[in-house]
Amino acid sequence: MDNQETLYKLTPAEFEQLAGRLLAADGVGNVNHVGGPQDQGVDFTAEQGAETVAVQVKHRQRPLAKSELREIVARLKSSTYNPSRLVIVTSAKISDEAKSSLDESEPDIPIRIIDRDEVLKFVNEDPNLRKGPMVTAEKRSRRQSRELWLGAAGAIASILGVIASGVSFFVQPTPPPLHQRIETVETAIYNLKNLEKELVDIKEDMAQTEQAAKAIEEEYEKAKELQQLTDEQFGAVKSALQRQSWRKTLLDYFLGFILGIAGSLTASVIYSRVQHRRALADEDA
């Protein structure tokens, strides 16, 4: 990632930190951060020799117009710090024409403008300036890129999984295997019923002796229990064949969870980047 790209990855607060370090590297002494709601347009005060310096920092991606520069100067001059020198540090590109115009309109006070090109020159020439805010912005950008790709990959994988799961739900097994399994169960039940009928006939034939009748009665009761159990098993088999597989249900829940995580991750990164772009466009950053 080149320095200019990283420069615009900085938040307004991080750019202010960079500006403070840059002022010190530029030979300005006793740099003091005073920015806040009641800063009167002054982000830093400093000293250069016996003179008081008032500094305003503007983090912008678009160029600053001449009218904006004049407004900045007017606020710095009218502050209670009574500066004898002014410094504007900005990430925006300031044309030579705008700089000259500002000098001509404010001949009574020296104005130093450190714009994007000079900021990048300082950073390129002094490796120490790349530490701190610049490194933090690079790491944050790489992390957000990884999160964005991870979120997108997770969302795509979940969508594909949901589609595959839906297809498997609507594509029913081929009729022959299912039909054969049901026929097997029905045949077994039919055979049991025939067995019951035969046992009834045998019971009638052998009812001549009490012992034979008792034995047949026991066999008959066992057959009845077996028939009842088989009826219940047959119902369970048919219900299981018609009901959605627990594996598919588990898969649906898992895919929904992954899709939710991926969506949340992607939305978080997008929201962070939108907020950053708004901050760069904010007139009071």
Image (cartoon, grey):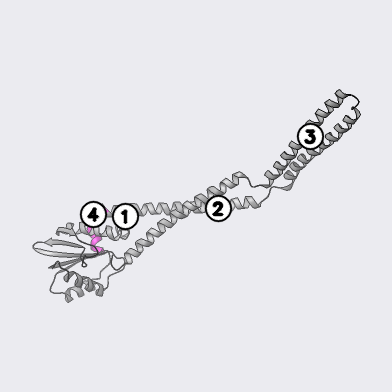
Residue 249 drawn above or below residue 209: below
**Residue beneath disc 1:** 137
* Mark-to-mark CA distance, 3 and 4: 91 Å
Q: Give the x, y percent position of residue 220.
A: 82, 31
Quarter holding the N terminus is: bottom left
Q: Amino acid at mark 3?
A: Lys
* Mark-to-mark CA distance, 2 and 1: 34 Å
* Mark-to-mark CA distance, 3 and 2: 51 Å
Left or right: where does residue 272 sit relative to residue 245? left
Give the residue displayed 40% in from the left and 59% down from the top: 271
**Residue beneath disc 2:** 160
| Closer to the camera in the image, 131 or 180 | 180
Residue 247 drawn above or below residue 155: above
* Mark-to-mark CA distance, 4 and 2: 46 Å
Q: Which mark is residue 129?
A: 4
Of the numbered discs 3 and 2, the one sitting upstream in the chain is: 2
